[in-house]
Amino acid sequence: MSYTPLHERPPHYTSLPTPPGNVNRSPRYASPVSSPSIPWPDYQNMSSSQDEEEYDAGPSHEEEHHSSYDEVDQAGPSRKRQRGESNGHPHHPSHRPSQRNLSDMPIIPSIFGIAPRNEFTKKVGEWIMECTRGREHVEIEIKLGTLHSPAGPQRIKLPTRTEIILQPDYPVGNFASTMHKRMNQNLNGLLNSAFQSSQQSPAPIKFFREQHSDSFYGGQRGHKLRVSRDRAGNLLPGGCIVKHRIGDLNVHSPNELFDWRVSVSTEEPFPEVPSGQPLHVREKDRACYQHQFCRIDLTVVTMRQENGPPQLSYELEIEVLDVPLLLAEGEKEARGESNRFDDILQSILDTVRMIIRNVE
């Protein structure tokens, strides 16, 4: 079934005839100048009348003496000019080299003196808060991978030139969170260089290795029970949990080799270690790089199942270190209090972007 954009859904179409149910509708995208609440013929008429008013030959006598604009200077009342009028000023900016020295000039964020809130970060933050509010034992992680089409293993293609957050109900196939061995090795070298260069910075990166195995068992209500042990078979602290996925937020990056997925889950402690054979076992050999607010895990995974040979894969994920701190700042943002919610989240998201832009 093809995806129907939000502007094609009720209530915008409740007053129009219902299309036949057997029509195979392809995805459509509204013109950026149209409104889904205005039928197209009415919109054309409205646009035509607006154009005639905007390019009127000149203001009436009454308009000249009763301008609706407040003037900053005393040059006279504001009026609309025909194209071509310059009032002494060139229509196009001069192409002659400027004599201003930008090296010592402060760049003002906008004409209002402030910068707008980053909409991408805002939307990710709002989604995280929606998923986590009222929950405990929350885990937030971001995985690199490729978003596949529902029809097959091909990567999705969307009409965008920049990264884009997909609607939660946009149909996608599998999210392949694996990479080639060569990419894994290149990222290992990149992160090692970042570790070395950060040691004199205010926030040096910490590096360590982890080797453990995760065994998965069938749990209650369809959830899987995960048991984590070290290589000697000893149960790790907090190593028996039930993991429940709350939601995924998919981000398509058409200019890069990878897309990425933000996932929110709960990891609830389980009191008993299950007996019997696990459904499957994932042996992990990790290189871990811990920064201010996130930890990057570059992992070689060996998947072992009862039937079939072991499978080797390479993965990278970014985990939020102090989830309670992030959520506390998000609650401050919701209350309109001073907070660092966007700053923390921006640092984590930019870490993801810097990694995928350096994948070779």
Image (cartoon, rainbow, N blue to C red):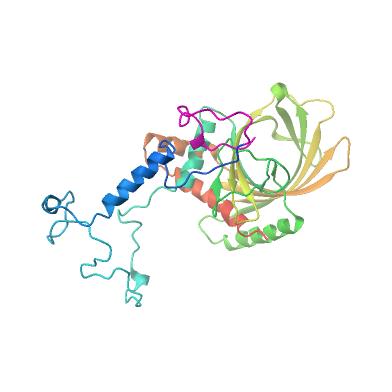
Looking at the image, residue 329 sits to the left or right of residue 213; the answer is left
Residue at figure coordinates x 65%, y 40% from the top left: 172
| Residue at figure coordinates x 83%, y 40% from the top left | 304
> x and y percent of residue 36 in the render?
44, 38
Asked if the magenta segment contains residue 4, the reply would be yes
Magenta span dominant secondary structure: loop
Q: Is residue 112 left or right of residue 240?
A: left
Q: Nearer the viewer, residue 85 or 48?
A: 48
| Span of residues in magenta | 1-24
Classify residue 166 by image quadrant. top right
Q: Residue at x 85, y 43 (%)?
A: 310
Asked if residue 110 lies in the magenta stretch, the reply is no
- Quarter of the image that includes the C terminus: bottom right
Return the residue nearer the eye: 161 or 323.
161
Quadrant assignment for the N terminus: top right
Answer above or below: position of 131 versus 210: above
Compared across the picture, whether 331 is left or right of 113 comes to right
* Residue 33 pos. (x, y %): 42, 47
Q: Looking at the image, can residue 298 be seen?
A: yes
Q: Locate residue 279: give its quadrant.
A: top right
Residue 293 shows in this picture: no
**Residue 101 x %, y %:** 34, 74
Above or below residue 46? Residue 237 is above
Quick check: 179 above or below 271? Answer: below
